[in-house]
Amino acid sequence: MKKKIIFGLIGLAVIFLFPIIDNNTYHLYLLNRALIHAILATGLVFLTGFAGQISLGQAGFYAIGAYSSAYFSTRLGLPIFLGIIIGIGISVLAGFLLSIPSFKLKAFFLSLVTIAFGQIINMLVVNLQPITGGPYGFFGIPFYHVGDYMLSFENVFWLLGVILLFTLYIMYKIKHSHYGRAMLAMNSDDVATETCGISTKKLKIAAFGFSAGLAGLAGALYAHLAGFLSPEPFTFFESSNFVAMAVVGGLRDMLGGVVGGIGLTLLPEFLRFGGWENYYLMVTSIIVIVIIIFMPKGLAPLLGNMFKKIFRVKSSNTKTL
Amino acid sequence: MLQDILQNIISGASIGATYGLVGLGVVFLWLTISRINFANISSAMLGAYLFITFYGMNLGFFLSFVFSVALIALYGLGLRQFIYEPIRKRGGGRLEFVVATLMLCTFWLNLIIVAYGALPRPFPPVFGKSTDFVSIGSIKISVLYLNIYFVIAILMVLIYILLNKTLIGKSFRAAAQNREAAALMGINVKFTTSLSFMMATCVVGIAGILLAPIYFVSVELGGGAIGVKGFASAVLGGLTNPYGTILGGVCLGVLENFSTLYISSTYKDVISFSVLILVLIIKPSGIFNWKSKRV
């Protein structure tokens, strides 16, 4: 048990020291995006893998978080921290709203409603010009700073890493509480759970709220990282990318969102070598399809097993994280 | 005033009928495999691009139409062989199919951007120009819309004959009602599944060719908005009634045209999205889903 913790800590230290080894700004920016996507995909793993609901409108919450944080910190001059909190709050409220259709609907029907939700939010982003800047974009969003000290990309990387760890910790806590067990039960059978005296409505509201909150947090973090918002990252195709991240990572795995979010953000960049510039997005989607067909359980359990095999040689009681 | 309203109904209904065709693609698959193909709308984009490619080779309207629809049908078979079957064999559930088809949608979009560029292309005026009008009394109807009606009417008659007057249609309906029982009666369920994939992609491909004069041949045809309108019309038909789906699409198109006329054009797409949400919440079994013996 102690060895597991030590290995975990060493692994974390290596990851956290990464920016010092490689301080190419573009790489750091990408890594930060990857961590943000990991936070969002973790929310989807929670919603889909644990609670059994589906959302193809996650980009809508992402947009709500991004634009509200940007609006409150830029136009109204609130501190970034407060802006992010407000962004999360509004997203959670929207998540509660979107949970209402899930009382009646399942699977495909629910996914259609969430698609429509995402499209409506996208339409609002494009058309509510006084607030969002519309297609011209939202400029001048303040970068992360503490007082007068501007954070560097390295600092932001560490900040995001801590937020991600905290998210995972909360998710771990929920999973192992009676709410988490109730959600897993609801995932297998709605009606049976209801007959056990558990209100599935409340669970669905909570699950949608939690994942929407994480998407809003991710959006707000992205807004302050990029400093500029346009409607493009908030389309239906981004929503489908987010779901792909969760599925490729592994829906039933705590770390599925992290593996999928980081993996699918960095994958196109690895394919972006000379002469391939036109094709890398196509190839990315093919790779995702192949992974889904051949590894329906996702990459995270696979990586977990590899981890086990490597470390079993050194210590017999090492388990996956 | 009255003629404005009539003209709007006529043009809205013709665009709406093409949304209905897109929805028909959803319905055919839902009937046989109870899955929704989220790359449904990609067939429309592929149809339009294939058509202008063949037309550009001077093959003429008829041959280009036949070739592109045939290729789209082949794509439907491929969809079954390379996406649906492998996922099913490896125990992937609904969600895997959802994500695989979503990624397929992205794939086709990127392929078209690589092959044809992202700029919209004009569609050859094979259905007449939208500026040519036919006058019936004081109402002017664009030739384009008349031709769209014409093609859709032929298509509906063909689908009706195929489903109701042939043995193939009978086995299709039987398999849609009860897969296992149909298989026990000696119906080739594998064949009807392939058929439904082909019919679904074909119908949407034709819808793409019909929509192209209105939306131009652009990646917008494979994007979200039109696809969602297709879903909305399919949901109005309860995902099972083909004729109700067309009717749903027509209503959607008319509603959209009137909201452009009386409210604002910026929010016209919101109408179909809201219809989709409201119908699913209030009456998920569909509004135009009358009980019929046909399918």
Image: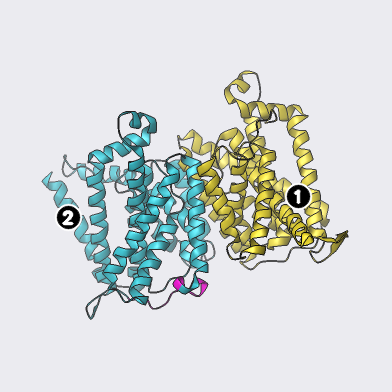
Check if mark 2 and mark 1 are on a common chain. Answer: no
Which corner quadrant of the image does residue A267 belong to? bottom left
What residue is rendered at 22% in x and 78% in y?
A147
What residue is rendered at 63% in x and 60% in y?
B259
Q: From the top left corner, tell me how far across and down residue A117 is, in percent.
A: 48, 54
Q: On the image, numbered disc 1 is attached to which residue? A: B67
From what the image shows, is residue A240 above or below residue A109?
Answer: below
Q: Nearer the viewer, residue A293 or A51?
A: A51
| Left or right, residue B258 beside residue A123 | right
Q: Residue furthest bottom?
A: A148
Quadrant (top left, top right, bottom left, bottom right) of the N terminus of chain A: top left
Q: What type is the residue that disc 2 sits on?
A: Leu
Question: Which portion, as a residue range, is magenta?
Answer: A131-142
From what the image shows, is residue A121 above or below residue A314?
Answer: below
Q: From the top left corner, tell me how far across and down residue B119 is, in percent.
A: 64, 68
- Label 1: chain? B
Residue A252 visible in this rendered orientation of the protein: no
> In the rendered picture, chain B carries what hue?
yellow
